[in-house]
Image (spheres, rainbow, N blue to C red):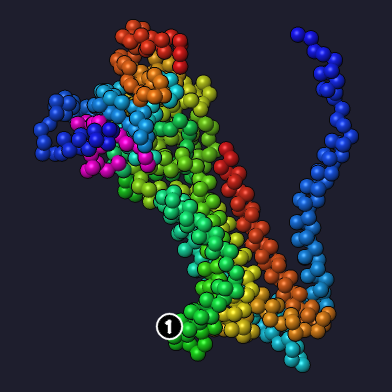
Amino acid sequence: MVNALNVELRTTAMPSLVMTERENDTVVAADASGSFTLSEVSVAYGRDLVIEGVDMYVAPRSVTALIGPSGCGKSTLLRCLNRMNDELGNVKVGGRITLDGQDIMGRDTDPVELRMRVGQVFQRPNPFPMSIYDNVAYGPRTQGIRKHSELDDLVEDSLRRSALYEEVKKNLKKHAFELSGGQQQRLCIARALATMPEVLLMDEPASALDPISTQQIEDTIAELKSSVTIVIVTHNMQQAARISDQTAFMLRESMEEPAHLIEMSETKKIFTNPDDKRTESYITGRFG
Amino acid sequence: MAISTDTKRGRALGRTASRRATEVVVRALVFACGWLAIVILAAIAVFLLTNGLRSIDEVGLGTMLTGTSWYPTSNNAQFGFLPLILGSLFVTGVALVVSVPVGVGAAVYLSEFAGRGFKEVAKSVVEFMAAVPSVVYGLIGVAVLIPWVRTTFQLDSGMTALTGGIVLGVMSIPTVLSISEDALHAVPESLRQASLALGNTRWQTTYKVVVPAASSGIFAAVMLGLGRAIGETMAVLMLTGNAAVMPTGVFESVRTMTGTIAAEMGEVVRKGLHYSALFSVGLVLFAMTFAINLAADLVLERQRKRWRR
């Protein structure tokens, strides 16, 4: 069923066909880069439909939090946005996702190019086994930047943006594994920023860190908001309330049916006056 | 709910004598098995040394190691190991040129690109390759490779270091492949994810992150392949021509250390000088393979520690 949906949407997305209304929306917002529009997005693992019918708009230069109980497909939905699900083999994504009006699921979109525009930070810090400098310069080097002065500037700038520069500036040649967990995660943020992405996806970036490191990551996110769009998956509702502008609540009500997007609106509204009873129950800690 | 006195008795603190005895016996057995390997290894070294002592005494270890002629049966007998050591190194060098690119390349393919089905089939085939007796490889070499080398390089004889080395290389592919594959497999998936998420292709991820991260394990694989090749006897005996002269290139006939021991041991006087010299050759071979394996082990251990964060 998902496959049929997929094929149908792919054909309607052929360039010469009539533009949809949604595309008109995003063309208006073209100068504000880094906005995502999801319509009727479904995900299936093999024959198992896990997410169904997600419609969502992610505003540019804002922080969007995805919350919901474990197994509700938050991370899966996040990976749709940079097509990391492609790497898992048996995952099918249906529906339509556009980044600044461009269809990112079409055959002519190269996931490798997409991922330079949509960076990702993972749950556990995963620096490469090389120096701090080489970690940050990894992405730019892939993009073909070879000039030392240019790389130096990019590395410094990225480390500053992730608020790590002051701690490591004396020794950028130090091996990344010598950093603390929190520093490693900020290094991973710097590494993702170095390719100059428009969007940064974060999959529970602070869940493996202590409270002080978590605080530093949250401060970094607040700083970054002015230059990149951030979509963050979090289990920590206080965190979502503190750092996000919009919050989306997802829920899979039973294992027999796929997860749905229950409600998405301004964070303040979700946490004070949600429209849906289920959102309220989750927020107030009655389940999940 | 009161606990009955029966239950209390069943939970006495002391273990019965028979259970304690079993414990002691089993522990002693396991302990003995653990130490047995070490004892055997040490015994081999001592055995080689004591039997080689006569030649070390009469000829001298330095003279043997640096001597360039091996004439063990002439009136003025010469026991120079260099032709044999070089013969082994030439053959092993050729073997590495064959086994490292093929073994490491195949490991990268199986670990990073192959589908699950193909990977399973390929792994069993490789295991089977390792189980084929070396004399069978030798036979194939005699039938196919010797004539091919002779005609292709226009030589008088196809029995050369090259011929033996190629067959030895094929024989050590399973070692290099499976240990390299283990090393690549041990690289955390999160590193691949990180690289892919930064806009790298699978291949870029492989050569920029995965292979460097597994490099020490791959190095160990090469070392163990080397150890396998240098100790192999039958195939080289059948293929290299066994001329005990100082080799100058791979297109010449050579004699390896292993080949020398195997070929001459049947014809020597027991406890004689020649007999003793052959044990010294064995001692040198033992020391070389021991050093190679030790180096590989140390490197592997370092890699294991590295990912245990």
Residues drawn in magenta: A89-111
Q: Position of residue B80 (x, y in %)?
A: 70, 81
Q: Does residue B249 sit above or below B103 in this rendering? A: below
Nearest the eye: B61 or A137: B61
Q: What chain letter is assigned to the residue under label 1?
A: B
Residue A261 occupies quadrant: top left
Q: Is residue A98 magenta?
A: yes
Q: Nearer the viewer, residue A113 or A285?
A: A285
The N terminus of chain A lies in quadrant: top left
Camera-side residue of A20 and A170: A20
Asked if one can make out residue A84 in the rendered structure from this viewpoint, the answer is: no
Q: Give A159 or B261, whichever is nearer the viewer.
A: B261
Task: Note whether B126 is above or below B16 in the view shown.
Answer: below
Horizontal side of residue B272 vs B291, given as left or right: right
Q: Is residue A54 left or right of residue B88?
A: left
Location of residue B23 (image quadrant): top right
User: Callout 1: 10 Å neighbours few (<14), some, many (20+)?
Assistant: few
Q: x and y percent of residue A237 in the render? A: 43, 16
Judge left or right: residue B164 versus residue A59: right
- Helix, strand or loop for disc 1: helix
Residue that badge 1 annotates: B152
* Residue type marked 1: Thr
Q: Is residue B32 above or below residue A227?
A: below
Q: How many marks?
A: 1
